[in-house]
Image (spheres, rainbow, N blue to C red):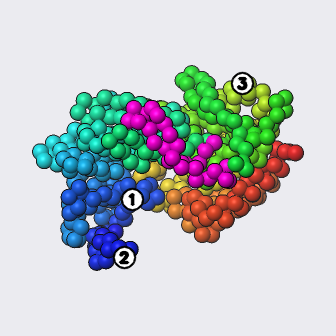
Amino acid sequence: MFVAKLNGEMLTNAVDVTAGLDTETPPKPFSGMEEVTFTPDGKHLVYTAKAPGKDQAWITNYDLWQVPVTGGDAVNLTEANKAWDANPTFSADGRYLAYLAMTKPGFEADRYRIMLRDTVTGQEKEVAPLWDRSASSLTFGKDNRTLYVTAQDVGQVTIFEVNTQFGDVKTVYNDGSNSVVGVTNDKIIINHKSLVQPGDLYSMNLDGQGVKQLTQVNREKLAEIKFGEFEQFSFKGWNNEEVHGYWIKPADYKAGQKYPIAFLVHGGPQGSFGNSFSSRWNAQLWAGAGYGVVMIDFHGSTGYGQEFTDSITQDWGGKPLEDLQKGLAAVTKQQKWLDETRTCALGGSYGGYMMNWIQGNWSDGFNCLVNHAGLFDMRSMYYVTEELWFPEYEFGGTYENNKELYEKFNPVNYTENWKTPMLVIHGEKDFRVPYGQGLAAFSLMQRKGIPSELLIYPEENHWILNPDNLEQWYANVLGWMDRWTEKK
């Protein structure tokens, strides 16, 4: 990371303030420059990084480090916390440092708590300790005492107002997926998007009223596009607990007709397919291709309280599978236009794992499957992933110490039941779930005579990021689904 002075349009006197740092900042792919901030006096930078060491693959101990803008030794500001610290944010007067902190070492989906440090007294406290949401960003208001916080919340990314003195939390805006761009004396500027809208800038009063759209970046393109109508629904899942999801109608929906189903399963597994818009796994692209889309936030998903998120740990193939089965049954009963006889399930990462798990444990559920970067063999996966902390937390220890649980939820142990046609997709530079996992699933199906195809991207990692590759990805996925759902 470099610091340089801006002289007109030229950057001058660049200083490497992380010289000799044997780690990475910002810690991609988890974050970006929100993990780096100047102190209000401009004399220091505070950034997020792990301490140098050989243990980086099996710990999540990211700390906040402070370094002079002129370079020199960095000071660890959060050394006492051995879990994840992130998102340093100063009040404009420099009095307070707010940041996010987990408490469980080795866990990447623990609740991010809001921490507040008085830079004068050194005193520190957790703000709103009883609030059961995991904050994702922090922005100080102009009074230097109020925080505007974003957090996933029942399928949305909501803006909250948090009083740092008393810990009161108020909902400001909870429709769609929102991020705070800036706060003035009387306005909040946000980037807002939803399942039917890519991001645009909006302003609103500090209480969330008076919402006004400021930009229409894609107005001309959107005028030519018809999106599918969507709605959030809920049902009784595992243990009769409430589980939420979304359905989306095909863009060309006509009453009285029935439509094949694209059953999207999110990754993480602590994640969510919510009310948002993205170039990757954009639900409207399936709706535009004539599919009814169903997305379930199964047990383990984020935005429903930490207990709900934690419930998937050490139960990868249990509660989530039951939720997916009950959710699909419930939504097809509620929405008669969904054709349960023509369904294709698809997912990436943990969603890809679930495709392999469905092959062995729900083998009569679908006409076809699409497995992107899915985990196939939990034993070999443990020894090749660059994120050892992940399986070690999710499965209660190392493979050697907890073989029984790894093998209980290991898709490779249920291959005698595999029979559903599957498209396998993987990036060769995927070090999270190395591409041998995809090759193994494909080879198995080829030898068993199960209809299967393999699509490998030599230059892609855990995600498909190149726009040209994305076009090819969607073309192959939709073509595969059209074939097996007999879509006309």
Q: Specify the amino acid type for callout 3.
A: Gln
Residue 172 lies left or right of residue 294; in this view the side is left
Q: Within the image, what quadrant is residue 132 found in? A: top left
Residue at screen point 20% across, 50% down: 94
Q: Is residue 211 covered in magenta?
A: yes
Sort mark 2 into few (<14), some (14-19) or many (20+) by Cα contacts within 10 Å.
Answer: few
Residue at screen point 71% across, 24% down: 334
Residue 33, numbered label: 1
Q: Earlier in the sequence, mark 3 or mark 2?
A: 2
Task: Determine contact: label 2, label 1, CB under 8 Å.
Answer: no
Q: Specify the amino acid type for callout 2.
A: Met
Residue 37 against residue 306 in the figure, above or below: below
Residue at screen point 28% across, 74% down: 15
Residue 334, numbered label: 3
Mark 3 → mark 2, Cα distance in angstroms: 60 Å
Mark 1 → mark 3, Cα distance in angstroms: 44 Å
Q: Is residue 70 covered in magenta?
A: no
Residue 122 lies left or right of residue 17; in this view the side is left
Q: Which residues lie in the magenta part?
A: 196-222
Image position, residue 303 (x, y; %): 48, 36
Q: Which residue is under mark 2?
A: 10
